[in-house]
Image (cartoon, rainbow, N blue to C red):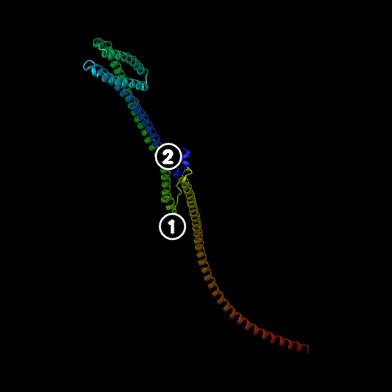
Amino acid sequence: MKFIKNLRIGAKLALGFGVCIAFLLAVVITGTRGMAQMNAVAEKLSSDTVESVKTCAALNEAVLRTRLWQFRYFTDEPSTFGDIRKNVGIWMDAANKAVKDYEGLASSDEDRKHIDDFKAGWGTYTQQSAQFASLFEKGNGPSAGVLFKGDMFKGFYDLINMSQALGDGEKKQAEEAAKTAQDTYSGALRLVLILSTIAAVGSIYFGFALTRQITRPVAKLSERMAKVTDVCVTQLTNGLTSLAQGDLTQAAEASTKPLDVESTDEIGKLMDVFNTLLAKTQNSIGSYNQCRENLTSLVRQLKGASTQMASASTALNGTAKQVESSAQEVGASMQEISSATNQAARGAAEVASGSTSQAQALSQSSMNIQKLVEAVQG
């Protein structure tokens, strides 16, 4: 069965047609043989049986004709005895020929026994017929009449019975041959019907099995291709479309299973191609899911970083406000310091002016003291 599966589709179809033709040839051969047997029986019936029946009829007619011509010895004039003797001889020759022909047609021991008995009786009757004719021709009619009505009549009666026995035997053989022909016909018809039924059932079964081997894998392939298109490819297409629009929630599932390749024919090769395409499609779906997971993880990381940056921004905003307040306080302090500095500068100026005056006074005092010293010394 595996060998048939691995055959090409064309070879499978050719094998299917070959099986159907083989069944048809078997039916034709059987019918032909049956017809040949019936023809043989018919030929035997026509050649042997019919010829035997005809020979028996000819033999019976020859015996009757011989007896009828011999009877004319009593009714016709003596001048016709020569003609009578001639016709008696003709019919006796016909009887002898019929006996010889039947011997060549006898097919059974019973037929041969009957013809042997007939020959013996016919030989005796022939001798009696010669004696009967001689007596009549010599003018001894009363003795010829005694012979004719006595021993010759008994011999004639036995010959008629034996010829009828031969005819009955041939009739029986004809009936047997007809029955054989009928049995042959019935047997041939029965065998043809049986073989025709077997051929029809075998052809239907083989055709169904062959069709199943072709259509079943095709149906599986069609079903899986539809599932790939409706589920896997559709989900992948929708996922890529959603991904392009920024939606990472659309998942794709590689739910289609590969086909079990059980043959190496065209359909098996097509299944191999499908499994290859399915593997590539499932790899694409896996890559898409991995990409979606990576992008989702990246978005989560970016979201966490954004939250941290928002917190840092809030903290920086508070710090900036504190710095601004401190700057304002420092500015006020600087203003106060500036005012105090101005006051100190004015005080310093006044002190400086007083110091100058004091210095001048001290210088004048020093000079006065110098003069006083000089005056003391002097």
Measure the alpha-carbon separation of dots 2 and 1.
55 Å
Residue toward you, 39 or 21: 39
Can residue 258 be seen here? The reply is no
Of marks 2 and 1, the one in the foreground: 2
Q: Secondary structure at mark 2?
A: helix
Residue 205 against residue 146 in the figure, above or below: below
Report which quarter residue 343 is drawn in.
Answer: bottom right
Q: Is 371 positioned to the left or the right of 217 in the image?
A: right
Residue 292 against residue 148 in the figure, above or below: below
Residue toward you, 94 or 19: 94
- Tell me which residue sits at (42%, 50%) in the image: 231
Give the residue number, with chain letter if any, for mark 1. Answer: 241
Residue 289 against residue 327 in the figure, above or below: above
**Label 1 crowd (10 A; few <14 / some 14-19 / many >=20):** few
- Tell me which residue sits at (74%, 87%) in the image: 370
Residue 356 image point, x, y percent = 65, 84
Q: Which mark is residue 161?
A: none
Can residue 28 be seen here? The reply is yes
- Which residue, as the protein is rendered here, is positioned at the far right? 378
Q: Is 290 positioned to the left or the right of 46 in the image?
A: right
**Label 2 crowd (10 A; few <14 / some 14-19 / many >=20):** few
Residue 342 image point, x, y percent = 57, 79
Q: Secondary structure at mark 1?
A: helix
Amino acid on which the number 1 mark rests in the picture:
Thr
Q: Is 374 positioned to the left or the right of 291 in the image?
A: right
Report which quarter residue 204 is drawn in.
Answer: top left
Lower sequence index among marks 2 and 1: 2
Q: Is 246 positioned to the left or the right of 361 in the image?
A: left
Amino acid on which the number 2 mark rests in the picture:
Gly
Where the C terminus falls, by quadrant?
bottom right
Give the residue number, with chain letter if any, for mark 2. Answer: 18
